[in-house]
Image: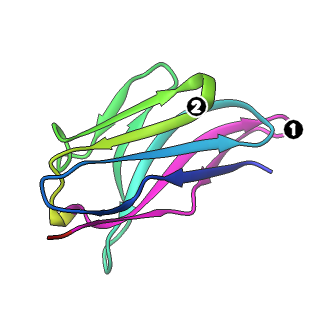
Amino acid sequence: QVQLVESGGGLVQPGGSLRLSCAASGKIFSVHRMGWYRQAPGKQRELVAAITSDGSTNYADSVKGRFTISRDNAKNTVYLQMNSLKPEDTAVYYCNADMRTILTGVHNYWGQGTQVTVSS
């Protein structure tokens, strides 16, 4: 069974920082594009940041200069460093990855989500 497990969410004051982690586990042959999405109450899920297996990144305009995505290919893990957090960053953050398993082709997987709340 292949899964993505997120950690690192929580409550933080405006201007603070959090670091999210997402580890892929199971019978994985290779991990390709990895990314973070978020969904705030009453809003659609949106891309926050993504990173390819060779390290190319892209960010939503709303987080550029504040968030940094990175990955450790040896650990099949992706990180999201979030600085200068704002109340509008409050959302459930989901990890997403394209992975090739031992037995199947490339499929897209989602984590269970981790809550990030920015409030004083």
The answer to whether residue 52 is magenta is no
* Depth check, front residue: 18 or 46: 18
Q: Specify the principal SS of the magenta part.
A: strand
User: Which residue is outermost to the bottom?
Assistant: 42
Q: Residue furthest top?
A: 54
- Indicate the amino acid at tag 2: His
Q: Residue at x 74, y 48 (%)?
A: 2
Q: Residue at x 47, y 29 (%)?
A: 71
The residues colored magenta run: 89-118
The residues bearing labels 1 and 2 have C-alpha atoms spaced at a distance of 16 Å
Q: How far across and down, in percent of the image, does residue 34 sit?
A: 50, 39
Q: Is residue 2 left or right of residue 75?
A: right
Res. 40 mark: none
The amino acid on which the numbered mark 1 sits, given as a three-letter code, is: Leu
Q: Residues within 10 Å of mark 1 (few under 14, many from 20)?
A: few
Residue at image x 35%, y 30%? 57
Element at label 2: strand
Residue 29 picture location, percent across and down: 76, 29
**Is 22 left, or right, of 108 in this rendering?**
left
* Residue that numbered label 2 is attached to: 32
Residue 79, image x and y in percent? 43, 39
The residue singled out by tag 1 in the image is 103
